[in-house]
Amino acid sequence: MGSVRFCDLVLADLRANTGRTRLLGAVPAFVFHPGFATVFLHRIATALVGTPWDKLGALIWGWNTRRSGCHLHLESQIGAGLSLPHPVAVVIGQGVRIGGDATIYQSVTVGRSGPDEHPVIGDGATLYPGAVIFGAITVGAGARVGAGAVLFADVPDGATAAGNPARIVRATSAP
């Protein structure tokens, strides 16, 4: 994920959640797009943590969590362009890494199962409503995890996993 400027993160999140491409569009998006507002407040909170303003960051994080019903842990790593079409009941735990341009729908839970067992969600992955991902599981770039799926194994790049327990229902063919 690397170091990305705050404005670039906000613009990518704005585009992902609203289709707008100018920073001026962030104000109405904050008011009318709950997914963008949730990600935006998370970006502010994480930017403040570790600075002299870290208590303000924690306050913003707590307010955002209660306001949106979406728990994005301050120690998760979330790439630019996160789309939360319906942010309610999304839980992204400590240590989780999410690549750029990922889409996460309502009631998705992604978290660790042990101290060093964190999920990794690849660039452009989509997690549909109610998906559950715990432990050292990797969801590849462009992969999809179906609604209500419970993952116990990795999902390769571009593949689709569904069911409980989840299994690969569609794999991409090698080029």
Image (spheres, helix red, strand yellow):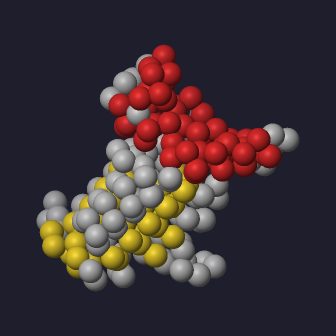
Residue occupying image coordinates x 46% and y 67%? 110
| Residue closer to the observer: 100 or 165 | 165
- Where residue 159 appears, x then y in whole percent? 23, 66
Residue occupying image coordinates x 16% and y 73%? 169
Question: Vertical placement of 127 versus 167: above or below?
Answer: above
- Where residue 60 appears, x then y in whole percent? 67, 42
Q: Is residue 41 left or right of residue 60?
A: left
| Quadrant housing residue 105 | bottom left
Residue occupying image coordinates x 56% and y 29%? 7
- Residue extending farthest right: 52
- Residue extending farthest top: 24
| Residue closer to the observer: 19 or 105 | 105
Residue occupying image coordinates x 54% and y 37%? 40
- Where residue 58 appears, x then y in whole percent? 72, 49
Could one spot residue 150 in this view of the protein?
A: yes
| Residue closer to the observer: 55 or 3 | 55
- Where residue 9 appears, x then y in whole percent? 52, 36
Looking at the figure, which quarter contains the C terminus? bottom left
Could one spot residue 101 in this view of the protein?
A: no
Q: How many marks?
A: 0
Question: Vertical placement of 11 versus 158: above or below?
Answer: above
